[in-house]
Image (cartoon, rainbow, N blue to C red):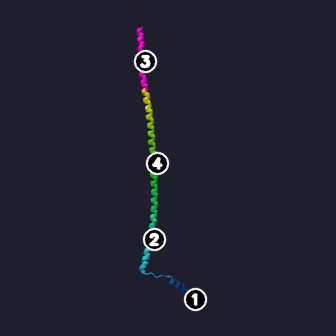
Amino acid sequence: MKQLIILIAFLLPVAIQAQDTIKIPAPVAKQIVLDLISGDSAKAELGLVQQQLTLTNKVVVLKDSIISSYIQKCNIYDERITNEQAKFNVQGLYVNQLEKSNKKLKVKLIFTKIISGAIVGSLGYLYLTK
């Protein structure tokens, strides 16, 4: 009797396992294995694509920072050009003022020479006639 209970105890799990197994035809099993392999390779490829996307994003960020630094340099150069133009405009106004002042001084010098010549001539005439 003990032997029969031991035999049933060993055969019962084997019978339950035998009922849980499914028999698949060989071509279908091969297709399932191929699908599993392609799924694994797709997961690996997805990982590589994600890494490549991360690197591409880093490259884009780097290029954007380079572009923004060039834009800042361009803005600085534009400011320099504007400042230089303002400086030249101020210098041009200063030159115009100096030219006007120079013309006034030349006219004043001419009048001074004419008047001093007239005074010297009249004094010389008066001296000679007396």
> Which residue is outermost to the top?
130
Q: Up-down: is 77 above or below 110?
A: below
* Callout 2 amino acid: Asp
Q: Up-down: is 62 above or below 101?
A: below
Measure how far apart labels 1 and 4 are at the Cα level: 90 Å
* Callout 3 amino acid: Ser
Measure how far apart labels 4 and 2 are at the Cα level: 48 Å
Q: Secondary structure at mark 3?
A: helix
* Callout 4 amino acid: Gln
Q: Are the residues at dot 2 and dot 3 in contact (C-beta closer than 8 Å)?
A: no
Neighbours of disc 3 within 10 Å: few (<14), some (14-19), many (20+): few
Residue that badge 4 annotates: 72
Q: Up-down: is 30 above or below 125?
A: below
Numbered mark located on residue 40 in the image: 2
Q: Secondary structure at mark 1?
A: helix
| Residue at 46%, 46% in the rendered image | 75
Measure how far apart labels 1 and 3 are at the Cα level: 154 Å
Measure how far apart labels 2 and 3 are at the Cα level: 112 Å
The mark lying in front, picked from 1 and 3, is 3
* Range drawn in magenta: 104-130
Q: Nearer the viewer, residue 22 or 130?
A: 130
Query: Which SS does the magenta portion mostly show?
Result: helix
Q: Earlier in the sequence, mark 3 or mark 4?
A: 4
